[in-house]
Image: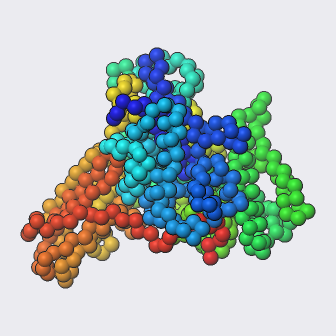
């Protein structure tokens, strides 16, 4: 890396953060410090940039807080959840115009880079950017392209898995000595009594629950002199459940109760009024979540009082939600992966709830081709597979839950809950009591909320950037590993693994003559590359297509050798060649296989 300040970026589903390494005189060397990236209506600086893009009729792009203000007025011109679109859909339609998702992401990164340049007084080029651990190669390639377009240098360790970043932030400044670290102030500062004794080897699980995804990692932390060394054991699969989905469930509950009392029919409302009403319910749900997440006052648990006068005609919304009621509303998102839960009976379509918004209002920017939450806030999850040492996977038909992520990581590591020495929580949802209670019940231990959980991800990115720049934070970071197995879809619906989940990166695998070509394929052969669990090939996700063109028709006994490489950023490259004539080869082409171009429209999918 260059001599520019060590920079970390958390490109979030709902908000994005950027931080730099501020030098300190204690053994840590640096303290992560946030960069102001936006401002409110009064001009006061804000550390968080809403990941929203608004396209006014003047065609001048607006990003951040100003775009949030337009969400309830012009939802058809606001792009939401861009992080979830990137790498899945090449373009998005906004007000009749098409924009590439890579260009939109580059615009957000450009905004963050300008803020860092102005705050630090230098032009930054290097940054460590966090991503969900389970982001596949296509999404990571799109993210790297967006960073390059924004003026950042793309290097071997540019991307860092979010749960690994949160773990790095938690461990920053901690030592192998028995004495707890001194109290200090900063993004990665542990409060008193929030420490783990790392004088011996410990096995920890960290769950990060953000705005749109849940990620988990299992790691072994051992003494390394006075410092610590981290070894990753497993990463969780893609679990697209986060804070937006919790707000959707609560908003759904408020709408149902209000409609029952007032006779409100959302479908009969004019489109503009309906969208504004739904947006108000989402904001109300967000405020209730914040109120209920505040600490008890004088031993009394907080209660969310909802008072909206004349919400519809002469009808008022008067509700009181306590923590128990909130837990009931979001129970489907915190389902125990060990318990059989019937599949949601509500099919996607009119009246179904899509993650992030109440019914009749699928969120702006969400592709209609990807299934999202049902009226219970759930997604079908993969079926279980037997494991000799780890816990079973979620039951068939179980709803997608935040808890699927840590349970999947634990299964991949081949461990049981009793094998863990600590469970850590990070992300904004780590402050929500319902999440803490669910994790406590699953692992039968009190989880530890990392210091400053909302900023732990970006703090860990700064620690990683400082280490790559030659700093000495007293922490040997974990080497990257593959989150999922990567292989080839074979005839009959099978899956042949090339690179297994948990493989240290970079990795290169050559399967010589391992694949026989079916008779009658002629001169053209297309080999689908996929990612997922080899025990459930029907649920594997397509990553790329290896296209081979031969000069003549192939004999029936022809065989193909495949060479697969996965670098530290988890960007995949695959090459195939004919055994009989190695000069005939082809590289895999990573492609975004979108069924349709998503529209920026929060009206109901029909």
The residue most toward the front is 58
Q: Which of 571 and 300 is in front in this view?
A: 571
Res. 205 visible in picture: no
Count all numbered tags in the image, as a single digit: 0
Q: Position of residue 301 (x, y in %)?
A: 76, 37
Q: Position of residue 280 (x, y in %)?
A: 75, 56
In which image quadrant can residue 274 be found? bottom right
Q: Is residue 411 left or right of residue 270?
A: left
The residue most toward the left is 580
Taking 509 as reference, is 373 above or below it?
below
Q: Where is residue 103 in the image (x, y as percent from the top left)?
A: 46, 57
Res. 566 visible in picture: yes
- Residue at 33% of width from left, 56% of height from top? 485
Q: Nearer the viewer, residue 573 or 50?
A: 50
The residue most toward the right is 314
- Residue at 33% of width from left, 28% of height from top? 470
In which image quadrant can residue 585 be found? bottom left
- Residue at 36% of width from left, 36% of height from top? 478
Q: In which quarter of the image is the N terminus?
A: top left
Q: How is the image coloured?
A: rainbow
Q: In which quarter of the image is the C terminus?
A: bottom right
- Residue at 48% of width from left, 26% of height from top? 22
Q: Where is residue 130 in the image (x, y as percent from the top left)?
A: 45, 44
């Amino acid at each position: 890396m260059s001599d520019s300040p060590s920079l970390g970026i958390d490109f979030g589903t709902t908000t994005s953060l950027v931080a730099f390494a501020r030098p300190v005189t204690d053994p840590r060397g640096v303290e992560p410090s946030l960069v102001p990236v936006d401002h409110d209506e009064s001009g006061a600086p804000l550390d968080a940039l809403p990941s929203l893009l608004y396209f006014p009729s003047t065609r001048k792009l607006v990003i951040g807080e100003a775009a949030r203000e337009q969400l309830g007025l012009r939802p058809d011109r606001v792009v939401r959840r861009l992080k979830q679109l990137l790498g899945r859909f090449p373009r998005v339609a906004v007000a009749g115009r098409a924009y590439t998702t890579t260009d939109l992401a580059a615009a957000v990164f450009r905004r963050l880079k300008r803020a860092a340049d102005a705050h630090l007084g230098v032009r930054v080029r290097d940054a460590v950017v966090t991503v969900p651990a389970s982001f596949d190669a296509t999404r990571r390639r799109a993210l790297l392209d967006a960073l390059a377009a924004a003026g950042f240098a793309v290097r071997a360790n540019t991307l860092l898995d979010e749960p690994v970043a949160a773990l790095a932030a938690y461990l920053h400044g901690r030592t192998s000595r028995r004495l707890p670290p001194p109290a200090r102030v900063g993004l990665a500062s542990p409060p008193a009594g929030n420490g783990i004794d790392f004088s011996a080897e410990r096995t920890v699980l960290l769950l990060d629950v953000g705005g749109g995804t849940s990620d988990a990692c299992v790691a072994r932390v051992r003494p390394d002199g006075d410092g610590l060394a981290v070894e990753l054991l497993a990463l969780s699969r893609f679990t697209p459940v986060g804070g937006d989905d919790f707000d959707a469930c609560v908003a759904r509950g408020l709408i149902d109760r209000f409609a029952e009392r007032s006779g409100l029919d959302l479908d009969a409302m004019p489109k503009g009024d309906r969208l504004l009403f739904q947006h108000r319910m989402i904001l109300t749900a967000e405020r209730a979540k914040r109120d209920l997440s505040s600490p008890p006052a004088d031993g009394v648990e907080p209660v969310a009082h909802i008072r909206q006068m004349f919400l519809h005609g002469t009808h008022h919304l008067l509700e009181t939600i306590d923590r128990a009621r909130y837990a009931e509303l979001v129970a489907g998102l915190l389902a125990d992966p060990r318990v059989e839960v019937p599949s949601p009976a509500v099919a996607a379509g009119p009246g179904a709830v899509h993650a992030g918004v109440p019914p009749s209002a699928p969120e702006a920017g969400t592709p209609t081709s990807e299934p999202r939450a049902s009226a219970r806030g759930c997604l079908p999850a993969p079926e279980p597979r037997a494991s000799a040492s780890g816990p079973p996977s979620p039951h068939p038909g179980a709803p997608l839950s935040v808890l699927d992520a840590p349970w999947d990581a634990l299964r991949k590591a081949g461990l049981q809950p009793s094998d863990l020495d600590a469970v850590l929580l990070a992300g904004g949802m780590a402050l929500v009591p319902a999440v803490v209670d669910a994790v406590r019940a699953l692992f039968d231990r009190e989880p530890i909320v990392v210091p400053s959980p909302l900023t732990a991800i970006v703090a860990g990115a700064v620690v990683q950037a400082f280490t790559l720049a030659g700093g000495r934070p007293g922490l040997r970071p974990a080497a990257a590993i593959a989150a999922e197995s990567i292989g080839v879809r074979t005839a009959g619906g099978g899956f042949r693994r090339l690179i297994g989940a948990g493989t240290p990166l970079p990795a290169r695998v050559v399967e010589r003559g391992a694949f026989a070509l079916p008779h009658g394929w002629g001169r053209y052969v297309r080999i689908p590359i996929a990612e997922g669990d080899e025990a459930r090939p029907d649920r594997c996700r397509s990553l790329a297509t290896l296209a081979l063109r031969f000069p003549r028709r192939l004999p029936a006994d022809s065989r193909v050798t495949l060479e697969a490489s996965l670098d530290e950023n988890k960007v995949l490259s695959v090459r195939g060649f004919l055994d009989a004539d190695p000069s005939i080869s082809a590289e895999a082409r990573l492609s975004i296989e979108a069924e349709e171009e998503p529209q920026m429209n929060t009206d109901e999918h029909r």
